[in-house]
Image (cartoon, grey):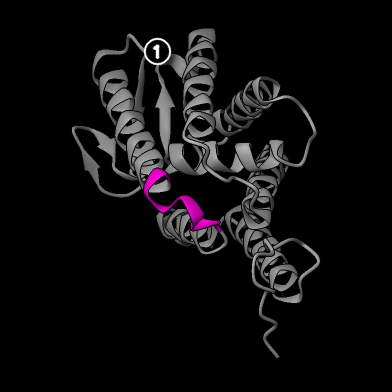
Amino acid sequence: MNVDLPKGVKPNFFFPHTLRTTWIIVAFYLFGAIGIGIPSTQPFFVYLIPSVLLLSFISILFYHDFSTHRNTIIALVSIFFVGFLIEVIGVNTHVVFGDYRYGDGLGYKLLDTPILIGINWVLVTYCSASVMELTKWPPSFKVIGAALLMVLYDFILEHIAPILKMWTWKENTIPLQNYAVWFIVAIVFNAFLRWLKIPASNPIAVAIFICQFLFFVLLLVLLN
């Protein structure tokens, strides 16, 4: 039986349908990690990564508070295009993050850059902001905290990305420059969300961030 939210009440983990969605996401990522961890099924599950990324993005939109509809569209579209442009410049000049190349794990590419990487910037920025909304920290601390979460997320992802055919680094060396730029961009994106007063209190976004993070950690254990 579906349970509708009372008018004016934001969804949280204690509403039955939200809790059910959370458990579906947990099972989804766990199943994916196991599938990638098995050599015979790894190619198939790697192929599904773009679809999983899109489904995760759609999920957070479904639970987003669209009371500031116009600002939300401005924020998400802006982060998508700016994030994608930064990656285009980075992968073609090697002066932003360092010397890296994208593989086929993120799907269709434009200018040697997967279009979905823009969605990923939106997803990780929004989800990290949602995690910080669980705290009582001042706004500026929430921005910094979200940025640090994004850098930590990237640190884990960088070590599993080549196996998932997402991207590779020259001589398999990840420069510190990459994390420094990630932190700066993350600060700007999260400050932009807060400047536009985007409501980021989203339980599904929190669940997705945690599941993705643990997904990459589990893969590091299974594949190393």
Kindly report the secondary structure that dominates the magenta region of the rendered protein.
Answer: helix
**Neighbour class for label 1 at 10 Å: few (<14), some, many (≥20)?**
some
- Report the residue that reaches farthest toward the left: 111
Looking at the image, which residue is at 65% across and 20% down? 140
> In what element is the residue under mark 1?
loop
Q: Quadrant of residue 156?
A: top right
Q: From the top left corner, tell me how far across and down residue 91 is, in percent.
A: 30, 22
Looking at the picture, which amino acid does disc 1 mark? Gly
Q: Is residue 65 magenta?
A: yes
Q: Quadrant of residue 60?
A: bottom right
Quadrant of image for the N terminus:
bottom right
Q: From the top left corner, tell me how far across and down residue 149 is, in percent.
A: 66, 29
Q: Nearer the viewer, residue 214 or 64?
A: 64
- Picture mark count: 1
- Report the residue that reaches farthest toward the front: 8
Relative horizontal placement of residue 71, taking residue 13 as reference (left or right): left
Relative horizontal placement of residue 9, taking residue 49 as reference (left or right): right
Quadrant of image for the C terminus:
top right
Looking at the image, which residue is at 29% across and 43% down? 115
Relative horizontal placement of residue 19, taking residue 43 as reference (left or right): right
Q: Nearer the viewer, residue 203 or 34?
A: 203
Q: Is residue 181 magenta?
A: no
Q: Nearer the viewer, residue 87 or 163?
A: 87
Q: In the figure, 25 relative to 119: above or below?
A: below
Q: In the figure, 9 relative to 180: above or below?
A: below
Q: From the top left corner, tell me how far across and down residue 167 is, in percent.
A: 41, 32
| Residue assigned mark 1 | 98
Q: From the top left corner, tell me how far across and down residue 72 is, in percent.
A: 43, 46
Q: What segment is highlighted magenta in the picture? A: 64-71
Q: Quadrant of residue 40?
A: bottom right
Looking at the image, which residue is at 33% across and 26% down? 87
